Image (tube, rainbow, N blue to C red):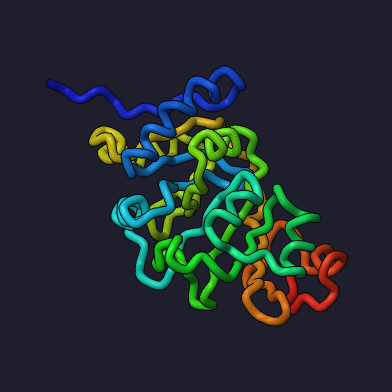
C-alpha cells in the first residue's frame, strides 16, 4: 500500500492552535521531535530531557559541542530549572523578553542535560513572543528545545512546506510532527548574550543591537 503524503498540522488561527496543542503535547511527551514556527524561522525541538535531546540530535545530525537552546514561556520556568538570572541578565530580560534575545545563563546542574550546556558553561534560553508556541509551552508545562529546522548547508526553513518536502520520511515514521504557522517573513536571528561572566557579552549579533542592549546594561561587551 502506498503511504499517504506527509502533511503538517495547521497552526495559524486561534482555533487551529487550540486544536493543535494537545496533539503537539502528546508528541512531546512521547519524546519525539516537533517542527514549529517561531518569531524568526521554523525550528525543531522537543522535551528538554535526555530522551528528548537524543531524539533531536538523531534527527538533526547535530555535531558534538553545538548545544540547543531552550524556549520558555515565563520566568517561573527558569526557577524550576535552577537557572540563575543575575542582576544584569534580569535587566536585559525585563526590557527585551518576550523577544528575539537569547540569554546564556548559569545554573541548571542536575536538572538540564549536559548536552544543552554550551562551551561557556551556561544554558541558552529565550522567552519566545510567538503566541502559538507560548501557548504550547504553557500547556506542556516545561521548556522545549530549539534549533533551526534545516539540513546542514541548507538555509533554515521559512515554511512548513519546506520541512515536509525535506523530512517526509521522518514525518511518515511518526518521529516528526510539523506545525504549519504559515510562511514567515525574513528576519534577523535572535541576539545571543552570554551572562555567565562578570560582564554580559554578545556572542552572536542579531535582531537587537548592542547599542539598544546597553540602554539596560551599559557595560555590555561586544557589538551587534
Residue shown at 73%/79% (left/top)? Answer: 199
Tell me if 168 is positioned left or right of 214 in this view: left
**Picture coordinates of residue 16, whole percent (x, y):** 53, 21
Residue shown at 20%/25% (left/top)? Answer: 3
Which one is nearer the viewer's eye here, 7 or 75?
Answer: 75
**Picture coordinates of residue 47, whole percent (x, y):** 41, 47
In the image, residue 214 above or below residue 77: below
Residue shown at 76%/54% (left/top)? Answer: 96
Which one is nearer the viewer's eye here, 97 or 151?
Answer: 97
Which one is nearer the viewer's eye here, 159 or 20?
Answer: 20
Residue shown at 57%/26% (left/top)? Answer: 12
Tell me if 161 is positioned left or right of 88 in this view: left
Question: Can residue 183 be seen by looking at this rendering?
Answer: no
In the image, residue 63 above or below residue 181: below
Q: Residue furthest left?
A: 1
Q: Residue furthest bottom?
A: 198
Tell me if 91 is positioned left or right of 8 in this view: right
In the image, residue 194 above or below residue 184: below
Tell how many labels.
0
Tell me if 163 is positioned left or right of 137 in this view: left
**Quarter of the view holding residue 1:** top left
Question: Can residue 7 be seen by looking at this rendering?
Answer: yes
Amino acid at each position: 500500500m502506498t503511504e499517504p503524503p506527509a502533511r503538517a498540522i495547521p497552526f495559524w488561527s486561534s482555533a487551529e492552535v487550540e486544536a493543535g496543542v494537545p496533539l503537539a503535547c502528546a508528541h512531546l511527551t512521547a519524546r519525539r521531535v516537533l517542527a514549529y514556527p517561531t518569531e524568526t524561522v521554523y525550528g525543531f525541538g522537543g522535551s528538554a530531557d535526555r530522551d528528548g535531546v537524543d531524539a533531536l540530535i538523531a534527527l538533526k545530525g547535530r555535531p558534538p559541542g553545538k548545544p540547543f537552546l531552550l524556549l520558555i514561556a515565563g520566568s517561573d520556568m527558569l526557577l524550576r530549572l535552577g537557572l540563575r538570572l543575575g542582576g544584569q541578565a534580569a535587566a536585559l530580560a525585563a526590557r527585551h523578553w518576550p523577544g528575539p534575545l537569547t540569554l546564556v545563563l548559569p545554573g541548571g546542574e542536575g536538572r538540564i542535560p549536559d548536552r544543552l550546556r554550551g562551551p561557556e558553561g551556561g544554558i541558552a534560553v529565550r522567552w519566545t513572543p510567538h503566541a502559538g508556541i507560548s501557548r504550547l509551552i504553557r500547556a506542556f508545562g516545561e521548556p522545549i528545545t530549539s534549533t533551526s529546522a534545516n539540513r546542514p548547508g541548507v538555509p533554515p526553513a521559512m515554511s512548513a512546506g519546506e520541512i515536509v518536502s525535506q523530512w517526509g520520511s521522518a514525518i511518515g515514521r511518526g518521529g516528526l510532527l510539523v506545525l504549519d504557522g504559515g510562511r514567515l517573513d525574513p528576519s534577523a536571528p535572535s541576539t545571543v548574550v552570554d551572562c555567565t561572566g562578570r560582564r554580559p557579552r554578545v556572542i552572536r549579533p542579531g535582531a537587537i543591537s548592542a547599542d539598544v542592549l546597553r540602554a539596560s546594561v551599559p557595560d555590555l561587551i561586544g557589538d551587534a
